[in-house]
Amino acid sequence: MEHFYLILVVVLFALAISDLIVGVSNDAVNFLNSAIGSKAAPKWLIFGVASLGVLVGSVFSSGMMEVARKGIFHPDMFMFSEIMIIFLAVMITDVILLDMFNTFGLPTSTTVSIVFELLGAAVAVSFIKIKMAGQSIGQLSEYINSEKALAIISGILVSVIIAFIVGALVQYIARMVFSFRQHRTLKYYGAVFGGLSIAAMTYFMIIKGAKGATFITEDMLKYMTENMLQILIFSFIGWTVVLQLFTWLFKIDIPKIIVLVGTFGLAMAFAGNDLVNFIGVPLAGFQSFKAWIAGGGIAADSFSMEMLKGKVATPSYMLVIAGFVMIITLITSRKAQNVVATSVDLSRQNEGDERFGSSMLSRIIVRKTMQANKNVHKILPASLNRFIDSRFEHPKGEKIVALEDEAAFDKIRAAINLIVSGILISIGTSLKLPLSTTYVTFMVAMGTSLADRAWGRESAVYRISGVFAVVGGWFLTALVAFTVSLVIALIISLSGNFMIFVFIGLAIFTVVRTHTVLRKRAANKQSEEEEHIIETDGTDKVIDKTKKQVLNAVITINQVYSTAVESFIDEERTQLREAVEMKTAFDKKSKKMKNKVSSVIEKLQQSDSLDLGHFYVQLVDYMREVSHSLSYLVDPMHEHLENNHKPFTDAQAAELKSFLTDATNFVNLTRQVVEKEQFEELNNVIKQRDDLIIKIGQLEKAQIKRIKNKEVNTRNSVLFFNIISETKNLLMHYVNLIKAQRDFFSNARK
């Protein structure tokens, strides 16, 4: 039996490594979003500073997580075999849950997940013990520390509200001071701002870092605590003087320094405090195993876990190893970049593709807020309104926050994000309030973006919906973590040890599966980026990518049309679904092109002729029309086949297949025209298009004859007429697309 439990301990540590990987991918958003969103420094420097913070934080770690041993349940009420079931259920659930959230790009709280997983598994095992002992369900309180879970929930609710309000208020004040012309105002207030910011981060690092370091003695900690005010004052004065001197001598970018220091501080705090969320449970299992072995052969189901009530130190080498695993994950994880992208997109100053749709609640909030804002403007003096608006005006001739490399927001906001997050987390820690670094940093970022007027009328409903989705995901985490962990612990307890390895296999399968999905998604995104026009493209690149877009559209249109018609005639549902998927993907691409028309036209202003922009708009419009025609054509066929309605008659199938052959030849000709820019062949293309339209008329007459002979029913006729009608529309818009491409190229290369 000893070997069996040794295997379980090894499994716990293997799950811990996996949990570290998925956990870092999730929590990287806490300390990376401000630096990456503001492009304060090259990515290698940002990740280097964050990695250093993670490593230092690992050494500063406060040891084994108390909640893993005794925070949620009373360990003296459980035996060794029961504790191992609880810990295994927790780790399996945590790996699956965090990996799923990372895959969908939603940041969640590792603290909440681990707490409610422990609660769910402990409730399951406690329930079984109560039933076996013939006790009442009311005695569950003897096993579970329910007050801790309730304290965490209340702490989260309070921290979400406070973080949002404080972040918005501080950012509003900062913008009033610095405006969006910070290259002027920083000359006067930059050093003071930097001194105050670094002093605040010093307080944060002392409270969240040094307080838990094993090499900090009680006397040193007591001295720092008692003299905190003096330390902060001297830090503020010292850094202000140093930064002012460096500004005069070396022209340093003070907000950049603040952002990097803040990134280091939050990364250190993350590793020093949240590290135990990932390795606390396995370490508790390891300590339990060692205590059981030292117990002298007592049966696993008879050995009490009372020893977990005491203080157990964590070996430093394990913390360092965990730190290096986190650093490697931080640098290499695509999922970490996926989660960071969600937070950055929701706080982006510029317009762009929104990740979330609108909701009724977000629309109501936006309307009410706009009305309240109008009422406030009426009350305030006109001169004050003009002054406030001037602080939020962007320099003429510049894009919104058009700083380095099209940053999502400027470094002033990035610095405020980090400072406010650090201070709030420090205050919460010093007051021993349970809060989550994920909640605080995310909500501060949302508050600052609101105060910075990043949520304008064009984006507010989508951003608010995104915030609701993320916050809702946090609370969903608690429910799912509790339920899944409870079910796994129940099944293992009732079905035996074999189910342990079944669930481990499920966890491995989930991680591998989601990794495959993410890799495929990343490949698709890279392919789209190569094709779609992005913010950094110049005019020549816009022209080249436009040609590629039209060529890919020609290929896709033929694939969708031919696959849809053939699979419908042959009643091949799988192939028809593939056509629907291709059509949907093409529709999204054409919609994305439509949404980016304004930004593309801005890039084309280098040309002397306005006709170039006009022809590009026409090109995109015809692309959308083609996409609509495909949708109106393919969707009814898919619905008809899915509902198992009667197929077309043999005569109808033969007519459509014959027409499809001619249409394919026509598309091949147009593909050659676009690919080789043989626009002199357009007259031939138009002639073939007209011939196809004549054949469509013949198909229509043949169908009318079938109706008169009562060979087909109404549903058949409606669908057949729809196919030939949308085919005609498709051909018209298709040729217009080629013409627009010709006109665009002709003007672009003058």
Image: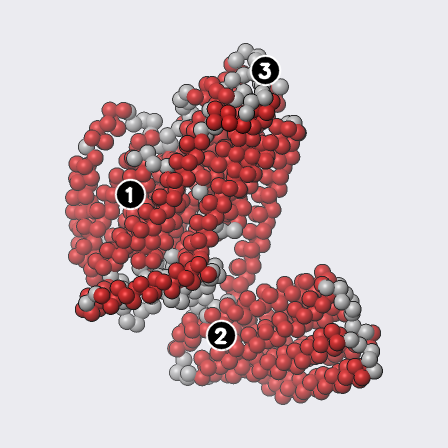
Between disc 1 and disc 2, the foreground one is 1
Question: Which of the pair 120/730 is nearer the observer?
Answer: 120
Question: Which of the pair 126/692 is nearer the observer?
Answer: 126
The colour style of the image is secondary structure
Q: Secondary structure at mark 2?
A: helix
| Residue at position x 28%, y 71% in the image | 396
Marks 2 and 3 close (CB-CB < 8 Å): no
Marks 1 and 3 close (CB-CB < 8 Å): no
Question: Tag 2 or tag 1, which sits nearer the N-term?
Answer: 1
| Residue at position x 71%, y 63% in the image | 642
CA gap, disc 1 to disc 3? 49 Å
Residue 436, image x, y percentages: 39, 41
Q: Amino acid at mark 3?
A: Ala
Q: Which residue is mark 2?
A: 543
The quadrant of the picture occupied by the N terminus is: top right
Taking the image as shown, residue 402 lies to the left or right of residue 359, namely left
Q: Is residue 228 above or below residue 5?
A: below
Q: Secondary structure at mark 1?
A: helix
Question: Tag 3 or tag 2, which sits nearer the N-term?
Answer: 3
Question: Which of the pair 600/367 is nearer the observer?
Answer: 367
Q: Which residue is mark 3?
A: 299
Question: Tag 3 or tag 1, which sits nearer the N-term?
Answer: 3
Q: Residues within 10 Å of mark 2 (few under 14, many from 20)?
A: some
